[in-house]
Image (tube, rainbow, N blue to C red):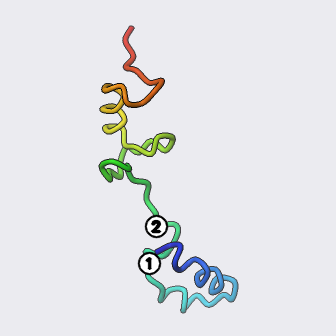
Amino acid sequence: MVAQYAEKRAALKAAGDWKALDELPRNSSKVRLKNRCQLSGRPRGYIRYFGLSRVALRDMALNGKVPGIRKASW
């Protein structure tokens, strides 16, 4: 939805037409995008580098599916 309304939103902002901008769907705003885990869709504990939540990353690391990561023990 953000990509769909991007041009219209930019044109309204440039024109300063705040009334028409307010009538667009709220989810068309870029600010409302939320990072979510690609596997589970979990919004919290998101690790941007991997695109996964901490829970999914831990499971994958323990199963050896993420190269270069292993559980620390000392």
Total residue callouts: 2
Contact (CB < 8 A) between labels 2 and 1? yes
Q: Where 11 falls versus 51 (above or below)?
A: below
Residue at screen point 62% across, 90% down: 17
Q: Where 44 falls versus 33 (above or below)?
A: above
Q: Where 58 falls versus 43 (above or below)?
A: above
Residue at screen point 32% across, 53% down: 41
Residue 38 position in % (x across, y down): 38, 50
Q: Earlier in the sequence, mark 2 or mark 1?
A: 1
Residue 59 position in % (x across, y down): 30, 32
Q: Where 40 falls versus 73 (above or below)?
A: below
What residue type is disc 1 on? Arg
- Mark 1 crowd level (few <14, some 14–19, many ≥20, 10 Å Cα): few
Q: Quadrant of residue 69?
A: top left
Q: Is residue 6 left or right of residue 54?
A: right
Residue at screen point 50% across, 73% down: 2
What residue type is disc 2 on? Arg
Q: Nearer the viewer, residue 65 or 56?
A: 65
Residue 3 position in % (x across, y down): 53, 73
Give the residue at mark 2: 32
Q: Nearer the viewer, residue 13 or 52?
A: 52
- Mark 2 crowd level (few <14, some 14–19, many ≥20, 10 Å Cα): few
Q: Nearer the viewer, residue 66 or 30?
A: 66
Q: Is residue 11 left or right of residue 37?
A: right
Give the residue at mark 1: 26
Residue 37 position in % (x across, y down): 37, 49
Picture disc at residue 67: none
User: What kind of element bears circle 2?
Assistant: helix
Residue at screen point 45% across, 45% down: 51
Tell me the quarter of the image containing the C terminus.
top left
Residue at mark 2 to residue at mark 1: CA–CA distance:
8 Å
